[in-house]
Amino acid sequence: MSDNTLNIFEQKAEEMTATHIIPATAVFAQTDGGFVSLDLDGKHYDRVKIVRLFPFSDADKYLSVREYEGDGKEIGIIEDLDAMSADAKEVIKDQLTLCYFTPVISKIYSIKDEYGYAYFHVMTDKGECRFAINMGSNAVSKLSDTRLIIVDVDENRFEIRDVDALSQKEKRMLDLFL
């Protein structure tokens, strides 16, 4: 390989691994279609995607802002949502609420295990719900000794914030997953 080719590879690697901090002066706006646009350093992005890098431990810190089209190249990182303008903060929070919709389970009516799937019937903070999980997958994740995230077959997330707040009967139903 020539020195020129190596320099191109090094430059590409540097671009791919560089971290760009998005300043509080960046302008985020909601589009007519309900998406989020970004104006940053004289460049306009019609639609961006915002991803929490630490969704459970630091939900409003270290938000990755990515191009929506193509391979979702990272534009930069918002270090702290509270540092952004009130307008930007509102637009970003609304978008995150849509993307990270996670009903909290407060009561478990039943869990039935059939043909490799577990069928849940629960009450959440958003109402009564039924969903299924694949028993052969890692659908139930422990975030702490008492906090669980359950991902159903459609990739919807549900949270149990405190297993100890459930009744003994409900805990026994969860034993298979704990």
Image (cartoon, rainbow, N blue to C red):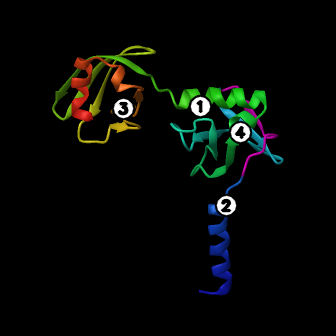
Labels 4 & 2 near each other (Cβ < 8 A): no
Element marked by disc 3: strand
Residue at point 79%, 32% (across, down): 85
What kind of residue is marked 4? Asp
**For the residues carrying marks 4 and 2, which lies nearer the camera in this image?**
2
Question: Furthest residue to the top?
Answer: 127
- The numbered mark, 4 or 2, whose residue comes first in the sequence reads 2
Checking the image for residue 18, the label placed there is: 2
- Residue 89 at what x, y percent from top left? 71, 30
- Residue 93 at what x, y percent from top left? 64, 28
The residue tagged 3 is 150
Q: CA distance from mark 4 to mark 1?
A: 17 Å
Q: CA distance from mark 4 to mark 2?
A: 23 Å
Quick check: 15 above or below 102?
A: below
- The numbered mark, 4 or 1, whose residue comes first in the sequence reads 4
Residue at point 39%, 33% (across, down): 149
Residue 22 in magenta? yes
